[in-house]
Amino acid sequence: MIAAWMVLFAVLDGAFAGFRGAAPCNARIRKRRYYARALSFGALAAFALCLVLAALTAILLAASPTPAADYATLVAVGGRMLSVFSVYAVCVALALLGYLLGGADLRVLSTVSILGPFTLIRPWMVLAAVVYGLRGQTNGTVITLTLASAGAVLLLGRGLGRFYEQRLQRELDAPLARARPGHR
Amino acid sequence: MQESWREISDLVVAYDPVTLARQPVLREQVVARLRAQGQGRAARIVARWPVRDGRLIDEFVDGVLLRAHHQLQRLSEEFRQGERTQRLLSPLLAVLRAAGVAPPYRVVDVGSGLGYVVRWLAAHGGLGPDVELLGCDYNATLVRRARALAEAEGLRCRFEVANAFALAEPATVFVSTGVIHHFRGPELHGFIEAQRRVPARAFLHSDIKPSYLAPLGAWLFHQARMREPLARHDGILSALRAHEAEILSRTASAACPDWSIGMLDGARSSVPVLRVMQTLIGVEHSLRAGFERALAGLGSRITWRGGTA
């Protein structure tokens, strides 16, 4: 169950990372479809990452002399991390509800008090969850997998951002290239 | 913050005031000026930019500005600048129609950048077929991009490289977002006075509302949302340089003595997180009473200089 929740949070985080990466890279006005695609792309990328991490987990556990005990420890670490993620997720979910359903003032309040600041603290929240999850932990396999998973989730956000930035740059470069002498 | 501090974007481009032709900008002059004013971080940002014969390369600067403006639009979307302008503009246009002012009603966005507000109004504003939407900016690259974006979505609006106050077909209403803090003292007076001389009938200038939380909020949002170092630097400085409502309305009253001047959301709040923007409003005296009636609930958030009509 813990693993399923972790995957769910990772996929949701990926969806939001896709949105965050895409949002400043498209200046059109009507872009619901663009946002829907960005959310789906982020979620799919996160799910693919989860599969890779699951494979890595299986490999490391298979190589461990105590796979069952290691897995139980991993689940315990995941449970502690989930408690941190859950607080964050509930705050973001409430703010999103306020933003999507509320009036102008509630939208601004949601943005100013939660959505903006929580984007900024996200890496620190993940770090806090890792520290809390791994406290007192000495099992190398568990530490490796936890750090790899947390790092991969954070890097995915950066990667999605870079992906959309490069796409925008190509779009911006196209008219300049057309304007250069010699271009046909 | 020192009063002389300037946004990087104000210093790295220069235009001939008459022809609007791009003027060369020497990187070392900009860096030296920023350093002399104690803007070390800004100086370091510009010092990394490439030069040709000591001059900043226009294409590079425009590339930075384009990316920064794309990121800036994200903030405009989050803070619903289009909707904010529409909520003031729609009643204002209704009053102009009722007062018998001849159409078309030309709404001109001063310093429109990528033209987010103009394009949003064209897409969602429902302002009517008698309204022309025009964005003016000195930067040809931003204007080209704004045009391309409008064309891609089939929006009924235009963008021109032009001085908004010297158009062949003058504005009926001037609007702007995040522009007015770039003008200080006599320049601010001149900026507002120019609109009355056009002569326009009204103006709506939205900008960051200064408060004790604004610098922290601006830092936080620009760190979270912006990726260009220029955008992060200028965004935070914009919050620091934002004018107090009293300064704006006093200057506007002096510049337009025969207009009614009001501030939407200009009142100070002990918890300034609900209203992070304020809008300087100027309307001809004869339009004010009708405008106040047409504003309905929004009217209670406007403080008029000199009290009721």
Image (cartoon, coloured by chain):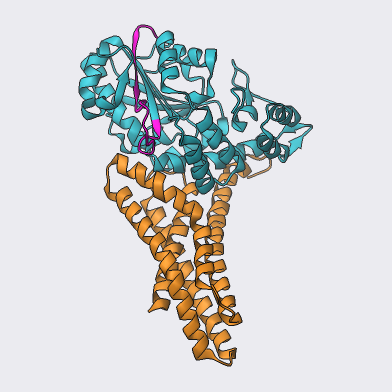
Q: Quadrant of residue A177?
A: top right
Q: Quadrant of the N terminus of chain B?
A: top right
Q: Is residue A11 visible?
A: no
In the displayed structure image, the side of residue A60 where residue B81 appears, left or right: left
At 61% across and 36% down in the image, what residue appears?
Answer: B62
**Quadrant of residue B4 within the rendered picture:** top right
Is residue A122 in view from this perspective? yes
Seen at 55% across and 40% down, the residue is B68
* Residue A161 appears left or right of B197: right
What shade does chain A have?
A: orange
How many marks do you count on the picture?
A: 0
Percent position of residue A130, x then y: 53, 68
Image quarter of the C terminus of chain B:
top left
Residue B103 spot, x, y in % from top left? 29, 18
| Magenta span of residues | B256-277
Q: Position of residue B165 (x, y in %)?
A: 47, 16
The verdict on residue B222 being magenta is: no
**Which secondary structure is most common in the magenta stretch?**
loop
Foreground of the two, A50 or A184: A50
Q: Residue furthest right?
A: B53
The residue positioned 47% from the left and 20% from the top of the image is: B164
Q: Position of residue A87 (x, y in %)?
A: 39, 62
Q: Seen from this angle, which residue lies furthest top?
A: B258
Q: Residue furthest front?
A: A136
Tell me the cyan chain. Answer: B
Q: Is residue B275 magenta?
A: yes
**Residue at screen point 44% across, 65% down:** A84
Q: Is residue B77 above or below residue A147?
A: above
